Image (cartoon, rainbow, N blue to C red):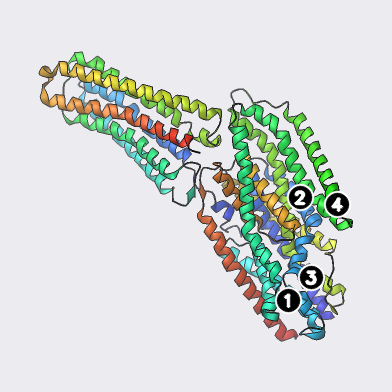
Amino acid sequence: MEAVVRPIIALFGKSPFGPLAQHAEQVRATVELTRPLVESFLAGDRDRTVELYERISKLEHKADIIKNDIRDHLPKSLLMPVDRGDVLTFLKEQDSLADRAEDLGVLVTMRDTRAPDTMRQSVMALVDAVNEAASAWFRVAAELPTLEGASFAGPEVDRMMEQIKKISNLEWEADKRQAEATRVMFDQEAEIGPVSVVLWMNIFRALGSVADHAENTADLLRVMLAKR
Amino acid sequence: MTLGLVILAVVLIGGLYMAWGIGANDVANAMGTSVGSGALTLLGAIILAGVLEFGGAVLIGSSVTETISKGIVDTALFDTSGRWGEQGPTMLALGMLCALIAAAGWLHVATHIGLPVSTTHSIVGAVVGIGLVSFGLSGIDWGTMGQIVASWVVSPLLGGLLAFISFWAIRRYILGSTDPVRATVRTAPYIVGGVAAVMVLSFIYKVLKNRMDVPPIVLALGVALSAGLLAGVLTAAFTRSLAPAPGMKSFDFVERVFALLQIGTACFVAFAHGANDVANAVGPVAAVVSLYRAGFEAVPAEVTVPLWVLVLGGGGIVLGLATLGYRVIATIGKQITEITPTRGFSAEFGAATTVLLASSMGLPVSTTHTLVGAVIGVGFARGIGALNLRIIRNIVNSWLATVPVAAGGAALLFFIARLFVG
């Protein structure tokens, strides 16, 4: 008798907000390793750099698994408090943070490049600014289930809107650090050689785009909150 | 005459069995959301459901019972002047028995193969089958039948609309206010008062209507408003002292308060469910009992449903709840955790108001389908993380299957029974 498919149970689908916060947590674990990665790269510790890259790669893969699981549970017949298309774009943007962190890992393990000591400070400043923007986003993302509980209304939402606005400032800060690091690098271009210049450009771009995606993800949440 | 006694005995057992099945299965759909949201403990849900299901069945259940016992089939055709002459009343009793057995049997089979079938649609389909096999299309009161089918479409929509408005208002004026804690404390008395007034109005009106000649709407309104006012004042005295624990998120406080308010709507649902669904079990019983009282010599035109028949139905529901229903409630409660007290409150308010309205109009609707409509209404007000709208198709399919199958089954049973009796 209890095997009946009850309409009232079948009605409830799997809410995406808990899993979206989980995905954010996995992406956070991935992006967090960019700091030790760049540090060991600057220190010329190749074994540790490769080891960190492998860890990043594994964590990124786990984020992908969560991402696909969320997608599989979002059929078109699902009624959600937010637009389904927005959720899917949001997920893709959030996943890109981990993807870019992995790209960075590939770049720093590709070639044994030495950085002059004069570059160290500006590079680490860029890494820190990027991580600050990203972790500002991860703090918001952890509150996604809270937003669902508050039905996307009220003081919780206002508080989160404030935090989202701060993220775009932090991204702007990271942009400036990226320009600064690039400028410092070109000051040494004769010393480091053209091949390394290309590599460094790509490293900076990968780092900068982690912050870009943090901002984009936050903006998508803002769109979801603003609708209706 | 002895045949009549046999029919009476079997229909009583059948009605009790059907009521037991409703208590075992359907109460869970209504109470599951309250247990799932943590508004009620399992024990609390069983006790409240038992008392209010019984109360709804006995106090309001007669309207829908009348519809099923004599509103769908044109019973006058079974009178002694009709096709079967003196056998007519016995044939009607036999037909009602067959309808009950067919409906119960189909529910049993459907449950086994996992179809989400409504008891309401089963019994209505089965009774229609008896009318059709006896007198063809003219055996059915199509006016009543049209209203019933329309109510099957309207009830989930109305339940959904009311639930949408309820949750929209909660979201707009409580969750979305700058100070949800203060908004909750301030609005709770009005909410409780409103729910109490609606509930009291429906049943006072019904009770008075049976006992007075003039439609006592003014008196009923007066009593209902006073009850609402009283409930509101009591709530205000209670909520004034409520404050969130330190560090508690404001909407968690709102949910905590609504967990208390949802006890009220859970009672409301149980009451409405008893009022509407008891007829599915005792509708045929009431028909046979009235024929028995007339000595199977005539089809009485105007007979009110005896109270003891409703007590039998209400008792059967409580029995089902006590023997098996509590387990099903626990199962559903565990599986529905997505619904929080504010959402559960809105859905239950929308569904119960709709079902009670239908009951007082004598329309047998599906409580479960109305509740599904109400939950979807909350979803449209951005209340629930994810709702599977494909369920709507399943529900429509279950109507389309249930009504013809129950009708066909009842017709076949009746045909076979007549070979032995006629």
User: Which of the labelled discs sits on residue B287, or is there none?
Assistant: 3
Ranked by sequence position, the earlier of labels 4 and 3 is 4
Mark 4 sits on what residue? B216
| Above or below: residue B27 compared with residue B131 | above
Per the image, label 1 sits on a secondary structure element best described as helix
Mark 2 sits on what residue? B52
Ranked by sequence position, the earlier of labels 1 and 4 is 1
Q: State the CA–CA distance, disc 3 to disc 1.
A: 10 Å
Q: State the CA–CA distance, disc 4 to disc 2.
A: 24 Å
| Above or below: residue B143 compared with residue B182 | below
Q: State the CA–CA distance, disc 1 to disc 4.
A: 37 Å
Rendering coords of residue B187 (x, y %): 69, 33
- Image quadrant for the C terminus of chain B? bottom right
- Image quadrant for the N terminus of chain B? bottom right
Residue A126 appears in the rendering: no
The answer to whether tags 4 and 2 share a subunit is: yes
Rendering coords of residue A47 (x, y %): 22, 27
Q: Residue at 67% x, 25% y: name it.
A: B243
Q: Which chain does the residue under circle 4 lie in?
A: B
> Residue B263 sits in which quadrant?
top right
The answer to whether tags 2 and 1 share a subunit is: yes
Q: Nearer the viewer, residue B239 or B40?
A: B239
Q: Nearer the viewer, residue B141 or A131?
A: B141
Mark 1 sits on what residue? B95
Q: State the CA–CA distance, disc 2 to disc 1.
A: 32 Å
Ranked by sequence position, the earlier of labels 2 and 1 is 2
Per the image, label 2 sits on a secondary structure element best described as helix
Rendering coords of residue B403 (x, y %): 62, 69
